[in-house]
Image: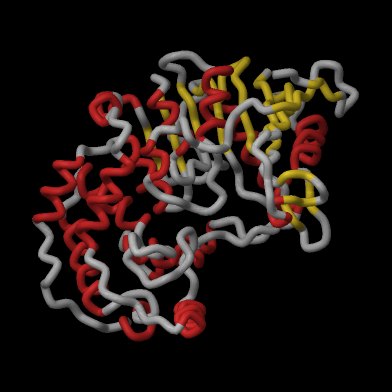
Amino acid sequence: MSKVALKLVSRAEFYAEEGEFWSSDEENAHSLHFSISLPDSFSPGLVSYFLKKYSSKDDVVLDPFCGRGTVPLEASLLGRTAVASDINPICFSATQAKLTPVDLVEVALFIQSVNFSKPVSLDGYSEYFEPFYDPDTYRELVNLKSYIQSNRSDVSNFVQMIGMSLLHGHTAGYFSGYSLPQISVSPSRQREMNDKRGTLPEFRALAPRILRKAGAVLRDGDVGRLQSRRGKHQIFQSECRNLSFLNKSTVDLVITSPPRPYVANSVNDLWLKNWFVGLSKTERDELRHGSLDKLDLDEWLLFMNESLFELARVVKSGGRVVIDLKRSFDGVNYQDLDEHLSNLINTNLTSYWENECLYVNRPTVPQLSKKFKEDGQVSRTSKVLVIRRK
């Protein structure tokens, strides 16, 4: 496929390429990538493309905003050493489960050990959970949650991830009545949705849904191979400005998708998942306080400046940082973050980094609906900035 070089800045060493470098259709991605859906996740195809382009077997690959674990999982599948961190415990938990998967027999034995019919307290049920779950479904959820927390292992971590992925959604395969699959709406909003549809939550047995989902995400195998590499990987709950768990000049490649400006943090949107993994109110408040919440562009650039300064400490000379930069809406206009970040690097960080390349990926998949277009451009178009450590 032809690639067109675009001159975007005056520096001779910086260039841009436009074309279809990776696919967003996910048809070739490993089934484990789809264990759980979280907001702002990015394409396994993107990750695979840059892993193959900029790293070799056994190289150390870091994602300091690991989200649902796309980078560390793909890195492990391709024989790289994965290092991942995220401030959100849900992301930490999901990444850990993906890197240490278990087979379906182990999942089935674990599920058989849960006493789903054990009576539970209904304190808080009518206020928070009744719009989502039938009382018997809620009882099963509480018993599963309690059993997982009392029996920590690779199996329980994997079942917990599968459970999180099924907490709410729009089909009968989920535990809840009709809801949104990626984010947890508020109880009042869920009541409105129930009233509009004229429905109430019906009983949804957990065991068959967990087994069906586990079977789907384990379809492509590789459980033994991933488990055999577990000693090589590192996963931390931390934020990008503090990578103290890594020594100087130990990382070969960073692939990441940082949070965007003007976007609210996802703590409230993930409240049901936070409950399921056992976060206390204090822990949720601390997470909310520590998360980036609707930063304006200047605040975001300051955050990125501090993050890239810390990354300069751990990335080897000649190593690269691949940054997936989604457009951000400031309430009036869409902001192209690659331009702002490139200028920041040229102004503040030239002792450590140099802008190397901007990839503009334009999939050829036709879009039939206007909702997929912005300013005349297909919304699947993505920009990835590559910077190189001096």
Give percent across and percent down for residue 2: 74, 18
Q: Residue at x 35, y 69 (%)?
A: 176
Q: Residue at x 45, y 51 (%)?
A: 37
User: Does residue 198 sit above or below 69 in this rendering?
Assistant: below
Where's the N terminus, which quadrant? Answer: top right
Q: Is residue 136 left or right of residue 114?
A: right
Instruction: Please name whichever residue, 384 or 171, is drawn nearer the observer in this view of the structure.
Output: 171
Give percent across and percent down for residue 17: 75, 24
Q: Residue at x 45, y 45 (%)?
A: 68
Quadrant for residue 370, please give it. bottom right
Where's the C terminus, which quadrant? Answer: top right
How many marks on residues?
A: 0
Q: Residue at x 48, y 58 (%)?
A: 182
User: Does residue 304 sit above or below 319 in this rendering?
Assistant: below
| In the image, farthest residue toward the right | 10
Instruction: Please name whichever residue, 196 or 385, is drawn nearer the observer in this view of the structure.
Output: 196
How is this picture coloured?
A: secondary structure
User: Does residue 3 sit above or below 380 in this rendering?
Assistant: above
Q: Is residue 79 left or right of residue 331?
A: left
Q: Is there any visible trace of residue 279 in the rendered image?
A: no
Give percent across and percent down for residue 232: 33, 25
Q: Is residue 196 left or right of residue 30?
A: right
Instruction: Please name whichever residue, 282 or 219, is drawn nearer the observer in this view of the structure.
Output: 219
Q: Is there any visible trace of residue 227 in the rendered image?
A: yes
User: Does residue 88 sit above or below 133 in this rendering?
Assistant: above
Give percent across and percent down for residue 154: 22, 42
Instruction: Please name whichever residue, 211 or 54, is drawn nearer the observer in this view of the structure.
Output: 211
